[in-house]
Amino acid sequence: MRVGYFPGCSLHATSREYAESVLAMTGALGVELFEIEDWACCGATSAHATNHLLGVALPARTLALAAEQGHEQVLAPCAACFNRLAAARHELRKDPKIARAVENATGRPIQTNVNVLSIVKLLQDLKATIREKTVRPLKGLKAACYYGCLLARPKELTDLDDVEMPSSMEDVVKATGATPVAWNRRLDCCGGGFSLSRTSSVVRLSRTILEDARDAGADLLVVACPMCHSNLDFRQKAIAKRAEDPTTLPILFLSQVVGLALGEGPLELGLDRHFVTTEKITSCLPEIEEQKNVTTGEADQ
């Protein structure tokens, strides 16, 4: 299976562990990822919020490059990147005026036939393969699947099975042998890009999410967004100061969960880069017991 790959800015910087796990996992699944040559930032947050034309032109240029390089579909693991690429494709299709402006701005023909995939959609379509290739079933682990905002909204862009009651991520988790828990906050916002400008709001929102997942009996929380991971993982020290029960919860990317089931090790999946220790997860898996020392220490916060 050949797929174009748009890592975006986060996977090249603050979420390197996400990139590492995506590449390790897709390799184990037999998916060939081809990074789009000369890709640029999708414009998530800054360009999107300040300049509408730029907010469409940046992801539109990436779609044009993908088409030029022979890709019929593009994987954007970052939820924000997925949302911006899918939004640009949608807007270029419905608005001829913006399409002409974008074509003039980029100097490239408009491409709206390139399909944009989220990591959840890619893995849901491969759930039978995941089940078949699993060598380390994650039996006994209870996972709270967290979709957040950008994978599920707006409904015109999502590639989930259902916008209001999605089960795509749960299907993937089940394929690894883990058990998804039923909980209430899986579509709530974690505070997103307000992590620096309104930290107290992010701490409050993230605390509510973490407490609900914990109360549902989850051993870990599964995400598919670098920003959500940052807020829920990095901010747990601040959250603990405001919580009645400061119990921590490991936050894993969906690709890391699948990678573990496929036999990849913690280092290959970037589990040593987390702020909240993942020992709770790795210690449950005898096959990687000898490697757990690389994931037991929390990073400096």
Image (cartoon, rainbow, N blue to C red):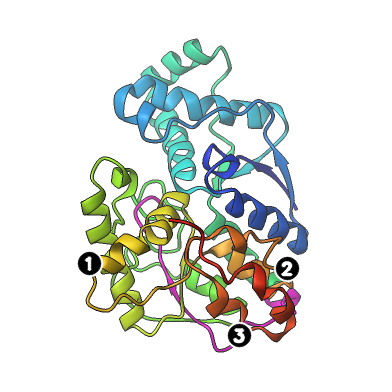
Q: Nearer the viewer, residue 197 or 227?
A: 197
Q: Nearer the viewer, mark 3 or mark 2?
A: 3
Residue at left offset 29%, top offset 74%: 211
Q: Which of marks 3 and 1 is in front?
A: 1
Q: Which mark is residue 264?
A: 2
Where residue 179 sits in the image (x, y, percent)? 50, 83
Residue type of the residue flagged with mark 3: Cys
Residue at left offset 71%, top offset 70%: 129
Residue at left offset 67%, top offset 67%: 266
Q: Distance between the residues labelled 2 and 1?
A: 36 Å
Stretch in magenta: 131-150
Q: How many numbered discs, if any?
A: 3
Q: Main secondary structure of the magenta part?
A: loop
Q: Which of 241 and 24 is in front in this view?
A: 241
Q: How crowded is mark 2: few (under 14 residues within 10 Å), some or many (20 or more)?
A: many
Counting residues from the start of the chain, the first of labels 3 and 2 encountered is 2
Counting residues from the start of the chain, the first of labels 2 and 1 encountered is 1
In the rendered image of this protein, does residue 299 appear above or below residue 111? below
Residue type of the residue flagged with mark 1: Arg
Residue farthest along the front direction in this orientation:
300
In magenta segment, residue 143 = yes
Identify the residue position indicated by label 3 in the image.
284
Counting residues from the start of the chain, the first of labels 3 and 1 encountered is 1
Q: How far apart are marks 3 and 2 (CA)?
A: 15 Å
In the rendered image of this protein, does residue 138 appear above or below residue 300? below
One can see residue 2 in this view: yes
Where residue 217 sits in the image (x, y, percent)? 38, 85
Identify the residue position indicated by label 1 in the image.
242
Residue type of the residue flagged with mark 2: Glu
Q: Judge left or right: residue 206 versus residue 89.
A: left
